[in-house]
Amino acid sequence: MRVLVTGGGGFLGGAVVRALLARGDAVVSVARGDYPQLRALGVETVRGDLAEPAVAVQAAAGCSAVVHVAALAGIWGPAADYERSNVLATRNVVAACRAAGIRALVHTSTPSVVHSGGNIRGGDESLPYATRFSSAYPRTKAVAERLVLAAAGDDLGTVALRPHLVWGPGDTQLVPRILDRARRGRLRFVGGGGAVIDTTYVDDAVAAHLCALDRVAPGVACSGRAYFISSGEPRPVREVVTAILAAGGLPPETRSVPLPLAVAAGAVAEGVWWLLRRPDEPPMTRFLAHQLATDHWFDIGAARRDLGYSPSTGLDEGFRRLTQWLQAPAA
């Protein structure tokens, strides 16, 4: 296949690109930045903003499938930026698929689209979308996911994947943020760190995308559906964070704050950051407080059944690989 991967310069997008190349597919990548390392791998690169319809059309031309990974992630920032990167760009990708006659679209979503702030224990795809969001990221991702699923029809097969907390060697989001906060003395657990969460080792997230790509087509059972993805090993937040700290050569964190205090602190920080128009992320937000203090792990049975997905990297093996990567001598 000739596959367009949006966001191919990012952590997950880049891993998907390399996996597609390894199995013999031709790959086109579109991103706002310049990624010479992709060109060195033989990837055709298109530089531009998917919020511009012409960029999406140019990138999709001649492709037979699209894996739409690109998104603006984070817990803070102007809502308009999230609307542009997550909603408008996705709408343009869907339109470009139709213009190019592409029949398979795999969209990277997030479990946050169903998280309203309470506990989710073994939730499956029958969970409704959240009715309230405390952050622009999950709200706009919910809109984008609905756009993709509604686009499924006789001419286009679509699947949305909801991988939870993707991490591993090469991570540019979760692992660096945890290590940076710990080094600066700003890391705290919320509610003791006992909340049980899913995570997804990057190789498993990639495998899920390839499984979906190989099965989605117009009219098949998985088309127009969303699927939760994880490594299938829910663990307490404290255990996950401690393992990441150990991989980075840092001691365990012992400090914690109660959830009500974290939520209040997050609300105050959001207000201050908004008033000062600060571009950096506050140390705490209401969304982050609830994410850290509530159970959110999911039943991946539907992905196993419909997509043939099966996680293959245990978390302990993943942490071993992460340790090797983080502690490798600098080149």
Image: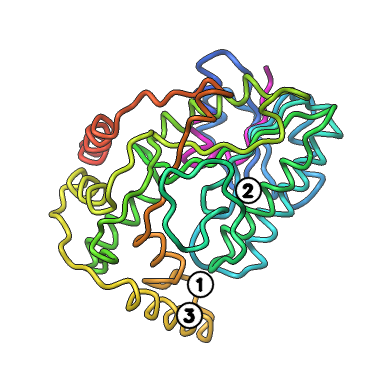
For label 3, the SS is helix
- Is residue 37 in the magenta section? no
Give the answer, above or below, for where 190 lies relative to 2.
below
Quadrant in the picture for the C terminus: top left
Q: Which amino acid does label 1 sit on?
A: Pro
In the image, residue 43 above or below residue 9: above
| Tags 3 and 2 touching, CB below 8 Å | no
Q: Mark 2 points at which residue?
A: 32
Q: Distance between the residues labelled 3 and 1?
A: 8 Å
Residue 9 x/y as whole percent? 53, 40
Nearest to the eye among marks 3 and 2: give it.
3
Where's residue 42, x and y in %? 58, 22
Q: Pick the residue in front: 63 or 302.
A: 302
Which quadrant of the figure has residue 281?
A: bottom left
Q: Earlier in the sequence, mark 3 or mark 2?
A: 2
Q: To which residue does mark 1 refer?
A: 279
Report the magenta residues as a range: 1-16
Q: Is residue 297 left or right of residue 76?
A: left
What whole-number distance in Å separates the C-alpha atoms at marks 3 and 2?
27 Å
Q: In this view, does 271 lie above or below 38?
A: below
Q: Which mark is residue 273?
A: 3
| Membership of 14 in magenta stretch | yes
**Distance of label 1 from label 2 (alpha carbons):** 19 Å
Q: Which amino acid does label 3 sit on?
A: Trp
